[in-house]
Image: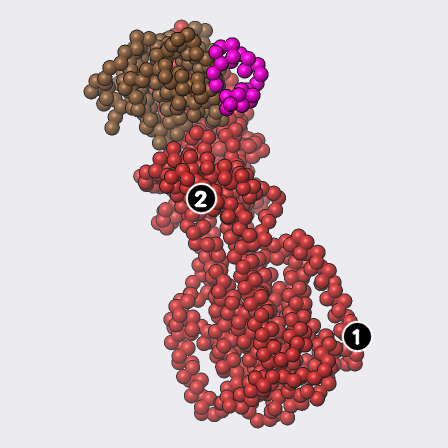
Amino acid sequence: MKLPAQLGNLGTPQWLALAWLLVVAAIGWHQWQFWQAPRLDTDVFALLPQDEKAPVAQRAMRQLGEQGERRVVVMLGAADWRTAQDAAARFDATLAAAHAGLRRAGDGGAATQALDFYRPWRDALLTDAQRAELRKPDTTALATQALERLHGLNTGQPTAWLADPLGLWSAWWSQRGGLTAARPRDGLLWVADPGGQRDWAVLLYETEGSAFRLDGERRWGDALDAAGRAAAGAGPVTLLRAGVPLHAEAGAAQGNREMNTIGWGSLAAVIALVWWAFRALRPVALIAVSLLVGCAAALSVTVWVFGQVHLLTLVFGASLVGVAEDFGIHYFTSRLASPATARWPLMKHLLPGLALALLTSVLGYLVLAVVPFPGLRQMAVFSAVGLVAAFLTAVCWFPALDRGALRGSRMADMVAASLARWPALEGRRLWALLALFTLLCAWGVSRLEANDDLRQLQSSPPELIKDQIEVSRLLRIPSPAQFFVVRGATPEAVLQREEALKDRLLSSAAGAGTPALSAVSDWVPSAARQAENRRLSAETEQQVLSKVGQALGEDLKRPAFNTAPLELDAWLASPASAAARAQWLGQVDGGYASAVLIRGLANRAQAEALHALGEQVEGVHWVDRASDMSGLLGRFRVTMGWLLVAGHAVVWLAMALRFGRSAWRAWLPTALASLGCLAVLGWLGEPFQLFNLLALMLLLGMGVDYGIFLLEHQGEGQGHAWLAVLLGALSTGLSFGLLALSATPALHAFGLTLLTGLALVCLLAPLFRLHKPHGKAP
Amino acid sequence: MRRRELLKLLPAGLAAAGAAARAQTAPELLAEIGRRLENPAVLRGEFEQTKTIKGFKRPLVSKGSFVMAAGKGVLWVTAQPFASTVVVTRERLLTLGESGTSRQVDTRQEPGLKAVNEMLMALLAGDVKALAERFQAEGALQGAQGWRLALKPRDAALAGFITRIELEGGRHVDSVNLHEASGDASRIRFFNHTASSLSPAEAGRFGP
């Protein structure tokens, strides 16, 4: 840090104050612009780490996710279809009248459009069963059936009779329809509960407008609630809803609530504490200003670096209030300790300690950025910038703006004096305490259980998740996190490999309840397969037509079909591909790739069987994003563990440079508190995860500050440093304690760890203080 | 008063034509046709079907008998030129061929077919109320007992198969004209209607 040395040489703090004023004005202007149209990100997946090892899987995840990002699914279940239909009508009417920004999607015209698109290639589209039958056709029996159909009761056919004399196409279409469980019925989509006797009406909606308007209000959620109440008028109805927008909205509402609780809660706590300690408006106002500048600068720089800011960053960043006030509090408690010293010389005297404290805290935050979590990087940048800005505000402005005497309160004096009664341990007592503490911790740490479950980042309300799972089950929506990636040199190679994979599953699968695959080749068979289908259908249909013609005395001509194969590009460009377009991943490192999704995956054994099956086909890779992510979180947990150990070593070294042989006194409380945190987690049965370690990293940065403050001030000043430490730790602890209330498990873990750690540091730090005057006192 | 409002909504030409043929608004017309139709529990009779299919020079004619059991389904027994039986119920479509072959399609798997089956049952039973749910109906009464109806599918999915259905009848449905989206058409005439009960064999066909 060169800054303190430079500052020491500057005689004119007014010059500094003005320079900082310019910066703050720029930040203010940027803030004013930002809040005109805040770019807030609420997607939980944006927090997830980039997995450099699997770019294709990542792309597949993103593409499949984008497909549904505006879609809301509502299902109304009743004992009979009529009630479900009635409920759906009431629901839709109420929702339409509410103008809540949800538009009914999926009109019936799509089916007709798709029929027209595929019609020229009818002869090239066969199901597996049909292909098997046509390889060894009994043309006499087929001709008899054709005659029966010709003369029988008409049951409808999507083509002219001559274009499909065997009636093959309906079966192909019904297999395409099988890709989702929902079927058109009476202008709605219908699903029957596979287990029970329930009929479900399915309504699809899309969110309107180009951007999410996530201002923390449950606009869609409330409208759906109201429509659900209206639907209940039809009779006993079960309502399920699912869709990314609902999770985003719930996340935004919750994030907003938490941000307000934590932000305003911390601010109120800090103001109350400062007022309680100093009984003067000036410290309160100045510290509030430093916090405000800190938060604004943090937000501006984050937006400038990342283009937008994640809502969870703001939630986490709200705890900054409880950390950034340390500098201000430390300055004002020092004023109490030596009221006679002039402002600027006092600040100059405090600077080395403050700068060192800032450095350790910022380092603690910046280590978060080592982990390639985009979300964590934002949080790290946000917090680090916020701290630096609050520090600069305190250094540049406080000496200039803080005029007049500071009385302090009796309470503050009592607290400052209380340090004298706090035992300072030396010699045998010290060792005994250390041994006891270590034993207790060892017992707790031995009970720790690691948990790298991805759901730590999940903060959606449980009922929404329950609905989502139920809707996925009923509609047989494929698993979003487990699928195959198929790669090949050309699109044709990819399609052929997909077909090989499907054939392999078909020949190995036994019994009902087997998962089914859905692939791009379901919609566009490979050119090779199209040619085979075309040959098979042409041969058999010619023969059947001539037999039927003979029987009826007609000269029947099979109409011509399109001889060029159905091309992937034509399909991608047509509305007919809407359902499966996202599965085509396009060009990927010199080749092409697609995702083959799995429907009806019921258990781990099935997933493992599929995994093994996929390995047997060339170019096919099994992807399990959930376990990949958990593995990644686990690897980061181990890395972070070592980084934490290294961090302690570095901090200890940095302090040895300033405090020499006394350095351990500043460092040991934090080290012990970290150990204690782990033990507490073990005792409480809380899972041990990456986020606990990240919190310990932060604890290292902040906890050491308290040791530094106590070491910096010896003799009489030590009591007031203790006051600063207590005030700082109290407000920081409160902020993170509020964070522990967060419904996001990761933030909860963060908050809980820091709350425990800070409390322990506070209790332990004075035990290790240097008792005798040191000669460095002012 | 409501009637006047509805009339205002109708295109002027249609309203005029409707007035000429003893003006009836759709709900009233359907209610009146429902009153004119007899609804026995089991109705049997004979049919003659004439299909006009693209690419065929001559129409395809078939003859046979039918049994319509209210709430259960339809037995469609073709006698000429090929013997075959089709059993239509809400749950399935069963075809029994001349050589004893049988093919069955479950409507649980193909709800599109379920819609078609329900439509066929409603058509043959003259269940105008059920028909009006799926189709837009236009029509007129003829004489003291007769009526005719033209139906257009409300549902886009159904319209992909059927463009228009014309029905004529009196106490029973006498003829059905079915125009398919593919351009094919079939005309079915019904006669010799009688009301009776199901034989055990017939009841067995409809299944459990």
Q: Nearer the viewer, residue A459 or A261?
A: A261
The answer to whether residue A42 is left or right of residue A553 is right
* Magenta residues, dominant SS class: helix
Q: Where does residue A37 sit, x and y in percent of width and height? A: 66, 52
Q: Which element is circle 1 on? A: helix
Q: Residue at x 40, y 38 (%)?
A: A234
Q: Are marks 1 and 2 in contact (CB under 8 Å)?
A: no
Quadrant of the rendering where the C terminus of chain A is positioned: bottom right
The answer to whether residue A355 is left or right of residue B183 is right
Q: Which chain is brown?
A: B
Q: Nearer the viewer, residue A428 or A249?
A: A249
Measure how far apart labels 1 and 2 are at the Cα level: 65 Å
Q: Nearer the viewer, residue A222 or A180?
A: A222
Quadrant of the rendering where the N terminus of chain A is positioned: bottom right
Q: Where does residue A300 sit, x and y in percent of width and height? A: 67, 61
| Chain A as rendered: colour | red
Display colour scheme: by chain
Q: Where does residue A365 sit, x and y in percent of width and height? A: 58, 68
Q: Is residue B29 magenta?
A: no
Q: Which residue is mark 1?
A: A15
User: Disc 2: which chain?
Assistant: A
Q: Give the mark nearest the N terminus, 1 or 2.
A: 1
Residue A359, above or below A723: above
Q: Which residue is mark 2?
A: A229
- Magenta stretch: give its range: B1-25
